Amino acid sequence: MHRLCCLLLPLFLLSCAGNGRGTLTAAEGRLIDSPGPTLAIVTWDPAAKTGAPVLRQVARRAAPLLRADRGKLDRLMRATLKASGGVGLAAPQVGLPLRIILVELQDPAKTVITCLDPVLEMKSPARVDGYEGCLSIPGKGGKVLRHESIQVRCLSPDGRVKIYESSGFEARIFQHELDHLDGVLYTDQLSGDLMPIEEMRRRRAAEKAAEEGREEIELPYQ
């Protein structure tokens, strides 16, 4: 049995690397080579519990990707995020089970960063409720309890180690996107009801009116 495993392993490695694209499958390679300016965002129906299976998978490491493929995917995901009007995007949302996320930082420039193989290294004991939506669950929203502040370590597309310390709404974006890499959707951890996005906005506006002096951020999709 041991000898058989030893024989099968090289065959498996050859099948993965046979397209010259590292760990990418042929279908994934075709997706990254897409001629379009953007990628299609895949969706999930939380009521029917059906949709794109990739949204329920644990994504695999992105570091083994070839540098050229990292660059292609980065450009495609950035264009897709910009076209969507969202503030975050994970590779599984465009059909790729890879540990890659994009986050729009909440600085004045709204800088978009790309994180490969991100790891949540620190999370505050304090947690806060906040409204969220998702590009992969269009037209819906709800409240989720998240850590108020976090620290994330990751790789940039060019392979440099990056550390981001984040709090507030920005930390919420990070946590939402990190969940996507483990097949978790925000609807799995609602602290209230899932509702139409219009109703969520109405409730949020009512809360804002009731809490004088508290700054609220208009919710884009994540």
Image (cartoon, helix red, strand yellow):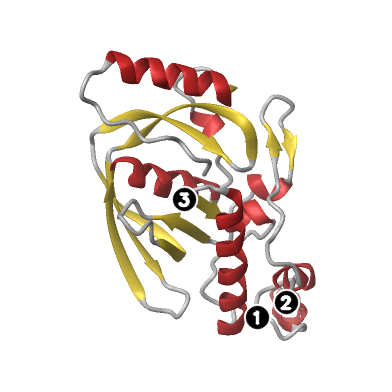
> Do the residues under discs 1 and 3 have CB atoms within 8 angstroms?
no
Say which mark, if any, is on residue 178: 3
Given residues 177 and 23, the one toward you in this image is 177
Q: Is residue 205 visible?
A: yes
Circle 1 residue:
22
Q: Residue at x 39, y 15 (%)?
A: 206
Nearest to the eye among marks 2 and 3: give it: 3
Given residues 145 and 210, the one toward you in this image is 210
Instruction: Examine the rendered structure and indicate whether residue 116 appears above or below residue 4.
Output: above
Q: Is residue 194 visible?
A: no
Mark positioned earlier in the residue sequence (2 or 3): 2
Say which mark, if any, is on residue 163: none
In the rendered view, does 97 fall on the left or right side of 111? right
Spot the residue most to the left: 213
SS at circle 3: helix
Circle 2 residue:
16
Q: Quadrant of the N terminus?
A: bottom right
Q: Residue at x 47, y 75 (%)?
A: 157
Given residues 118 and 86, the one toward you in this image is 86
In the rendered view, does 105 fall on the left or right side of 88? left
SS at circle 1: loop
Q: Residue at x 70, y 71 (%)?
A: 32
Q: Say which amino acid is labelled 2.
A: Cys
SS at circle 2: helix
Residue 222 drawn at (x, y percent): 52, 44
Q: Residue at x 38, y 56 (%)?
A: 110
Q: Say which amino acid is labelled 1.
A: Gly
Q: Say which amino acid is labelled 3.
A: Leu
